[in-house]
Amino acid sequence: MKIADIKIGQRLTIAFSLTTLMLAVVVTIGAIGMRATSTEHASGTAAGIASFYTTLMIALGAAGGVMSLFTAWYITRGIVGPIRHAVRVARTVAGGDLSSNIEVRSRDEIGQLSAALKDMNTSLINIVSEVRGGTEAIGTASAEIAAGNMDLSERTERQAGSLEETASSMEELTSTVKQNAANANQANQLAVSASAVAGQGGAVVAQVVDTMASINASARKIVDIIAVIDGIAFQTNILALNAAVEAARAGEQGRGFAVVANEVRNLAQRSAAAAREIKGLIGDSVDQVDAGARLVDQAGVTMTEIVASVRRFTDIMSDIAAASQEQLSGIEHINGAIAEMDQTTQQNAALVEQASAAAATMRDQAAHLQAAVGVFKLSGDGVARRSASVKPIKSARRGAARSQKESQQEFAELASSAR
């Protein structure tokens, strides 16, 4: 067993035992000397014996003093030195320097204290390394999140501006569609009125056609009557000629009758001439009536086509008016949806600003934590820092990407729920 492996209590016990043993030896030798002196008092060698024992006691005292000094040095070397080393290490750790090497030179209580300080230093190195890597990862991730949030905030603001422009355009389009719908309704009403007027005109033309047909029939009857009158005038003329012939045969007795017959013949001729003139006029009238009847028939066909066209136009205008109303309703729904999307986008922009503020706060806290951890000095500080922070940074970047993706998904869900 080495001396360094002996515990402090055992060391003190051994030193105390050695000192007690030396004192017992000195006392024993002194007692023996005194007894020898008293026994051989009468002899001549008493002075020599006393001088021998005196020298022996001085030597033993000197040896005891040397042994006491050795014991003190032994105790000081085994207790005070390691304690001073442990105090230096503790002050170094308290100053933030974790790069000192703590040696364990014994297995006693001081060695156990040194081992505990070494374990504490190792634990602090691991903790500081992990915290430093974590703070660097948090700082990098918060910076990336802040940059992503700023980008998302800008895009959200641009989207909000686009939605506002779209909303204003939709309002203008809505007003235009409302005006078109109103115009379509007015046109529909006018088309209905025109259809009614065209129907009335068609009915009047039909009545005119019937009237012209009646006039044509009456004119033909008049022609027949004129023909009868012409026949009567012709027969009257023949009778007048016969009467004149008979009056000529009668001589003087038939002269008055001849005058009457002559007048009758003249009247018959005039009646025949008038009947011929009336017949010509009636014929012209009948021809004009026929031409008018044909024109009226054409006008009737045209009015029928006009009525049908106006009815088709009325139906088309009704369809246009209904389509305009449906279009107006759809545009109003779209306008409402765009307004809701605009409101949702504004809310998303506010949420992004809050997230950006939170990311900036987290970045500041990470910077403060890095500054606080930067007080500690590690062995191989640059290499240890890089090796300890590479993996946490990558994982933090992946976590930041996942967080940003989850935030975008939440924003998309909010937008879809708003829609």
Image (cartoon, rainbow, N blue to C red):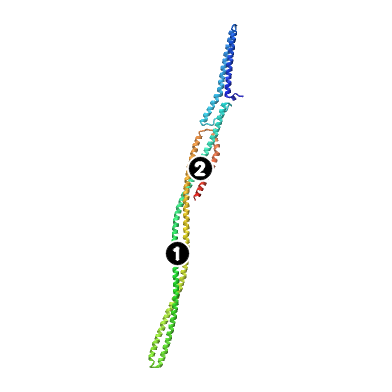
Q: Residue furthest right?
A: 1
Q: Is residue 359 above or below residue 264?
A: above
Instruction: Give the residue type at disc 1.
Output: Val
**Which percent across, then down, holds residue 365?**
49, 38
Residue 382 visible in the snapshot: no
**Which percent across, then down, holds residue 227?**
44, 82
Quadrant containing the N terminus in the rendered view: top right
In this figure, which residue is indicated by the disc labeled 1? 192
Residue 203 visible in the snapshot: yes
Dot 2 or dot 1: first in sequence order is 2
Q: Is residue 88 left or right of residue 175?
A: right
In this figure, which residue is indicated by the disc labeled 2? 145
Q: In percent of the image, x 44 and y 62: which residue is there?
A: 189
Question: Could you say which quadrant of the image residue 193 lies in?
Answer: bottom left
Q: Secondary structure at mark 2?
A: helix
Instruction: Give the residue type at disc 2.
Output: Ile
Q: Is residue 325 above or below residue 76?
A: below
